[in-house]
C-alpha cells in the first residue's frame, strides 16, 4: 500500500474528500514512485496524534516511522501507550514502516569511551535512548515485541558509538550484529542498520564493509546519505551509493547536510533540497535499483523555526524531489 492510495481510502470510507488537505502533486509523484513515503513522527511534534494528522492530512502519507511518542522513546512505551498509539494510527489509516529503536547506540564494552557517547559529558541521548551494553539483549527483545504490536517487519539499529580506531573491535562488533540479526530472524523480523555519522558505520564505504562482514539475510542497511555527508563523505551519492549492494538496502532516511569546516561539527543540517545529497537523483537511482521500501523524512534541520515548520519546509523539498525524479 503506497502513500498514493489515500484518495481511494477516503472514497471507500465514505469520507468527503474535502476532509483532507491532500496535495494532488504528491498523488502525481507517488504514481511514479514505488516507495513507502513516510516521516518520523517526532520530527513534526511529540504529540503523536498531531504528528499523524499532519503526516496523513497535510502530507498525504500512509506511512510513518516511530522513534519517540509523547516524549517517550519507543522502547519505553507501556501497554496503554501502545494501545493509544495504535488507535491513532487506525484513526488516520497509517501504517508503520519500522521501529526506529536505539539498539546498539551505546559504547562497545572494553573499548575506549567514544567521543560521541552521551556519557562523555553526562548528557542524555536526544531521543531518550540511553541504554547500557548490558541492556541491549532485553532491548532487542522489547523491540521485536513492539514490531509485532505495530505490525512491521523492520527494526532500526546501530553499531555502537564511533571509535577513533575501530579495527581492534570490528570483528566483535560484527559478531554482535550477526547474533542480533539471527535473533530477529527467528521472529521474522529484519534489523536495518543505519549508517549513523556518530557510529562506527557512518559512510557508504563503511556500510559496504559491514554488510560484507555480516552476511545474515536478517540484517539490511538503513541508507542515510545525509549522515554520510555529515561524516565527510561528500560523494555519498552517487559514487558511494554505486558501491552499495542494492539488495541489502532495507530502509532509507531523507535529510540533507552541508559541509562547513568552520563549524565545530564540520557540517550543518539543511532543509531537503538545500544540501547534499541531490534527492531527485537519489530517488531515481533507488527506483532503478528496484528499491520498494520506505523513504522516510528525518528532518533534523532546525533553521526554519519550530520542528513542525522545519519538517513542512523539508517535506516541500522532498516532495519536489519526488515529483522531478
Image: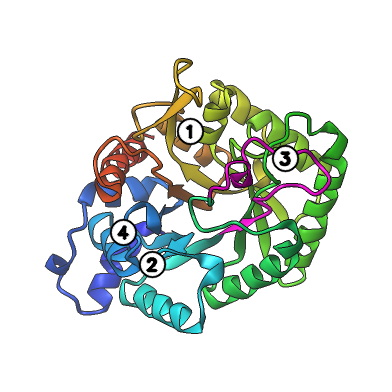
**Nearer the observer, 124 or 256:** 124
| Earlier sequence position, callout 2 versus callout 4 | 4
| Earlier sequence position, callout 1 versus callout 2 | 2
Q: Which quadrant: the C terminus?
A: top left
Q: Which residue is mark 1?
A: 282
Q: Which residue is mark 4?
A: 55
Q: Which quadrant: the N terminus?
A: bottom left
Classify mark 4: helix, strand or loop.
Answer: helix
Camera-side mark, 2 or 4 = 2
| Earlier sequence position, callout 3 versus callout 4 | 4
| Magenta: main secondary structure | loop
| Earlier sequence position, callout 1 versus callout 3 | 3
Start-end of magenta stretch: 101-123
Horizontal side of residue 254 vs 115, given as left or right: left
Q: Is residue 223 above or below residue 190?
A: above
Camera-side mark, 1 or 2 = 2
Q: Which residue is mark 2?
A: 70
Circle 4: is it few (<14), some (14-19), or many (20+) Cα within 10 Å? Answer: many
Circle 2: is it few (<14), some (14-19), or many (20+) Cα within 10 Å? Answer: some
Circle 1: is it few (<14), some (14-19), or many (20+) Cα within 10 Å? Answer: some
Q: What residue is drawn where x is 24% and y is 46%?
A: 309
Total labels: the figure holds 4
Cα distance in 3D space between marks 1 and 2: 32 Å
Camera-side mark, 1 or 3 = 3
Q: Is residue 163 above or below residue 108?
A: above
Q: Which percent across, then down, holds residue 112?
A: 77, 38
Q: What residue is drawn where x is 72% and y is 72%?
A: 187
| Earlier sequence position, callout 4 versus callout 1 | 4
Classify mark 3: helix, strand or loop.
Answer: loop
Q: Which residue is mark 3?
A: 113
Tell me if I can see residue 1 in this picture.
no
Classify mark 1: helix, strand or loop.
Answer: helix
Amino acid at each position: 500500500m503506497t502513500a498514493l492510495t489515500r484518495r481511494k481510502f477516503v472514497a471507500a470510507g465514505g469520507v468527503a474528500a474535502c476532509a483532507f488537505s491532500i496535495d494532488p502533486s504528491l498523488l502525481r509523484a507517488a504514481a511514479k514512485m514505488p516507495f513507502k513515503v513516510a516521516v518520523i513522527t517526532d520530527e513534526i511534534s511529540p504529540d503523536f496524534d498531531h504528528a499523524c494528522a499532519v503526516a496523513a492530512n497535510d502530507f498525504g502519507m500512509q506511512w510513518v516511522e516511530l522513534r519517540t511518542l509523547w516524549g517517550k522513546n519507543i522502547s519505553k512505551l507501556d501497554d496503554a501507550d501502545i494501545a493509544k498509539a495504535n488507535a491513532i494510527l487506525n484513526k488516520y489509516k497509517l501504517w508503520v514502516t519500522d521501529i526506529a529503536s536505539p539498539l546498539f547506540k551505546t559504547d562497545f564494552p572494553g573499548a575506549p569511551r567514544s567521543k560521541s557517547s552521551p556519557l562523555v559529558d553526562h548528557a542524555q541521548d536526544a531521543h531518550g535512548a540511553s541504554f547500557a551494553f548490558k541492556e541491549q539483549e532485553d532491548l532487542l527483545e522489547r523491540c521485536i515485541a513492539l514490531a509485532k504490536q505495530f505490525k512491521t517487519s523492520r527494526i532500526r539499529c546501530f553499531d555502537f558509538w564511533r571509535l577513533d580506531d575501530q579495527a581492534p573491535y570490528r570483528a566483535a562488533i560484527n559478531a554482535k550484529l550477526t547474533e542480533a540479526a539471527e535473533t530477529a530472524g527467528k521472529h521474522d523480523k529484519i534489523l536495518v542498520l543505519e549508517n549513523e555519522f556518530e557510529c562506527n558505520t557512518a559512510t557508504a564505504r563503511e556500510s559496504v564493509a559491514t554488510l560484507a562482514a555480516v552476511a545474515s539475510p536478517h540484517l539490511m542497511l538503513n541508507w542515510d546519505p545525509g549522515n554520510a555527508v555529515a561524516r565527510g563523505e561528500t560523494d555519498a551519492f552517487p559514487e558511494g551509493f554505486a558501491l552499495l549492494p542494492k539488495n541489502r538496502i532495507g530502509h532509507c532516511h531523507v535529510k540533507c547536510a552541508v559541509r562547513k569546516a568552520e563549524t565545530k561539527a564540520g557540517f550543518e543540517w539543511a532543509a531537503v533540497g538545500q544540501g547534499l545529497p541531490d534527492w531527485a537523483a537519489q530517488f531515481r537511482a533507488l527506483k532503478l535499483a528496484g528499491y520498494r521500501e520506505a523513504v522516510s523524512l528525518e528532518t533534523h534541520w532546525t533553521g526554519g523555526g519550530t520542528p513542525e515548520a522545519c519538517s513542512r519546509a523539508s517535506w516541500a523539498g522532498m516532495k519536489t524531489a519526488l515529483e522531478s525524479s
